[in-house]
Image (spheres, rainbow, N blue to C red):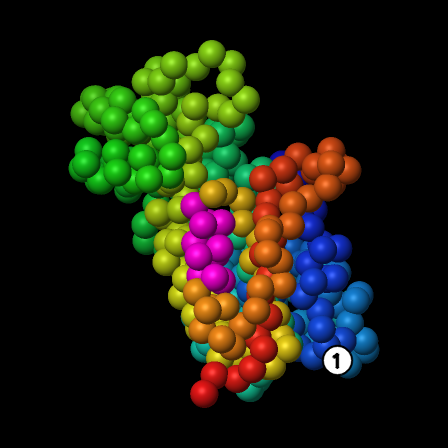
Amino acid sequence: MDGNYIHQPVLAGEVAELLVTDKTGVYVDATLGLGGHAIKLLSTLDEKGKVLGIDWDPEMAGLAAGNLAPYGSRAKVVQGNFANIDQLISGEHLNTIAGVLFDLGISSLHFDKPSRGFSLKYDGPLDMRINPANPLTAYSIINHWPYEQIEHLIRICGERHAGRIAREIMDKRQAKPVETTAELRTIIEKATPYHGQKTHPATRTFLALRVAVNYEFDNLTRGIQKVMPFLAKGARMGVITFHSLEDRIVKETFRFMAKMGNWKLVTKKPVAPSEMEIEANNRARSAKLRVIEKTQEAK
């Protein structure tokens, strides 16, 4: 790997079209990545419009800062977890924002860099941490969690062979620790029937590990709740999800917000990428964008 990573932002045009209601406002990209969505937003806003970008991964935040440098003071990058988005926004002396985006996909940098341990494609350590300072790793889960916890984790992420996989992991780790993504992939292939289906049999297990390591579901609900008071009247919140569990959380949360009376759904159904976008970027195929608007301040 040469270190020149390219991440193609998903649904970038749709995000800019649906999220921007005030072209002079401040928008927050809570999952900045390499800055693709932020750049699209900045190109849509007037010269007074600004973007605050947040990323939990310090390496990613540094790369994004370089990509956004041409926009000068219109773009600001902070490193932090969007679960603490209220503190991060307040730290920039902002009382209100015009919109916020959560793109819950994992960057191409994470998937394409073997040392991060996210991908089935490359052999690497069982890591999967978005932030390397996070003490929990996929290695810790696979080698130290009990059978019941591993089986439950994999099962709730949709793996119907969770019991077989968990038992095979238990058997293998008794002989020696499971240390790499390739070892885990081989274990799962042995534990499950694999007859050339579209997705690899380890896909859901790798997803489950990533979700657990990075507290993804907890962070999502906390991030949505904590950013709500900062959104001005008429401001919008957009969330891009990549699997059904995330989408269900967002769908149910947005419906509850709409019932509160201070919010309205902008997208009754999720916006999906076009066939043209999927053809150009296969990783976009499962993306769904939902958007909600704040109609009035909470009393």
Q: Quadrant of residue 67?
A: bottom right
- Residue tagged 1: 24
Q: Nearer the viewer, residue 185 or 266?
A: 266
Residue in the picture at 36% in, 18% down: 192
Residue in the picture at 50% in, 68% down: 258
Q: Is residue 257 above or below residue 156?
A: below
Please give left or right for residue 1 compared with residue 46 in the image: left
Q: Quadrant of residue 111?
A: top right
Q: Is residue 122 magenta?
A: no
Q: Is residue 200 above or below residue 257?
A: above
x, y percentage for residue 143? 25, 35
Q: Is residue 108 above or below residue 40?
A: above
x, y percentage for residue 273? 68, 44
Q: Which residues are magenta?
A: 245-255
Q: Is residue 247 magenta?
A: yes
Residue 91 showing in the rendered view? no
Q: Is residue 217 above or below residue 286?
A: below
Please give left or right for residue 48 compared with residue 10 in the image: right
Quadrant containing the N terminus in the rendered view: top right
